[in-house]
Amino acid sequence: MTSMKKIVAPALAMIISLTFNISTPSANMYEEAQINVNSLNVRSENNLNSNIITKVNSGQKYLILKEQEGWYKIKLNSSQEGWISSQYSTKKQAIGVIKGNNVNVRSSNTTVSDSIANLNIGNEVRILDKNEDWYKVQMNDKQIGYIYYNLIDIKRDNMNVTRGSSDKLSKLYEVASSKLGSKYVGGHEGPDTFDCSGFTRYVYKTGAGIDIPHNSTAQSGVGTTVSKDQLRLGDLVFFHTLGSSTINHVGMYIGNGNFIHASSGGHNVITSSLSEGYYQERYVTARRVIN
């Protein structure tokens, strides 16, 4: 019996070891790959024979979703993922940017836990983990706490703007969010009722002192074009809706794949997603007015 136990014990240990090593290795979701070469192929699978779906360039950063056999699976934008060879990038910790004012940093991932700090729009934290609907973060003073997921955005390189621009973007968000629930009325541009281009015109004029046209098609010609995967707070996003083949709707990007707009269908100023449903299918382009 004793000899049988000596045989079974190592065998059982080996089975347990194999069981725990069968699963595909995964990365910390809040690490990023910073690209070190120009024109690096992004492939559909983690091998050199798979299709090239796009290319990325030196200095760009992408969230790492998975690590496997010398490859990183990265998040290109809200709806696209791909694989890159890990030897051509450097792994870095992801940074989060606060999206509102007086945001509570709590001692644990619940609203009834103590608030250990308050942060404002534009403040940055290190993203350590995500637990259900909460980010675990480290602040500049090294304190660790939790922030509700909807109040933080993962920083992209293109969010590195000057202090003056950052202040304007913060003000845009403040003005736009203060109008949530306001009524949609065609031809109106505030302060209490809006159509889509009237809303974005009001937000830019009030929040940044910038005068843009009261027309969605005309607004699509201001500023500079920005790709969907490089959107940041304040960018104007454009759509063709109601069967139109031309641009006839506009909103303002606010982070996390969402935008704020005066919706004729919703009859109010609301927030909607760019990454699913109606507006994902009707998205046309985006413009950056504040660099």
Image (cartoon, rainbow, N blue to C red):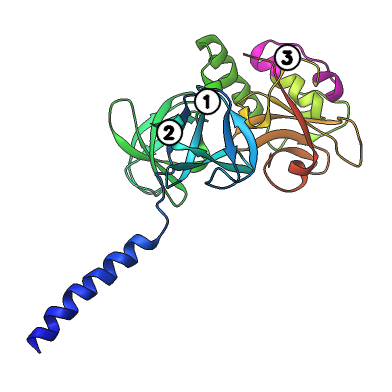
Residue 259 image point, x, y percent = 67, 34
- View extreme (left): residue: 2
Q: Viewer-nearest of labels 1 and 3?
A: 1
Give the mark nearer the N terminus: 1 vs 3: 1
C-beta proximity under 8 Å, tags 3 and 2: no
Give the mark nearer the N terminus: 3 vs 2: 2
Name the residue: 50% across, 22% down: 59
Alpha carbon separation for disc pair 1 and 2 = 15 Å
Viewer-side residue, 55 vs 233: 55
Measured along the vertical axis of the image, is residue 87 above or below residue 83?
Answer: above
- The kind of residue tagged 2 is Gln
Task: Count residues near mark 1 (Cα–Cα under 10 Å), then give few for <14, some for 14-19, many for 20+.
Answer: some
Viewer-side residue, 286 vs 4: 4
Viewer-side residue, 146 vs 277: 277
Q: Which numbered tag is attached to residue 223?
A: 3
> Is residue 257 visible to us here?
yes
C-beta proximity under 8 Å, tags 1 and 3: no
Name the residue: 85% across, 33% down: 185
Q: Viewer-nearest of labels 1 and 2?
A: 2
Q: Quadrant location of the C terminus?
A: top right
Q: Which numbered tag is attached to residue 60?
A: 1
- The kind of residue tagged 3 is Gly
Residue 5 image point, x, y percent = 13, 82
Determine whether the residue tagged by mark 3 lies in a helix, strand or loop. loop
- The kind of residue tagged 1 is Gln
Residue under numbered circle 2: 87
Residue 67 image point, x, y percent = 43, 45
Task: Count residues near mark 2 (Cα–Cα under 10 Å), then give few for <14, some for 14-19, many for 20+.
Answer: few
Name the residue: 34% across, 60% down: 21
Asked if the magenta segment contains residue 210, the reply would be: yes
**Start-end of magenta stretch:** 204-219
Alpha carbon separation for disc pair 1 and 3 = 22 Å
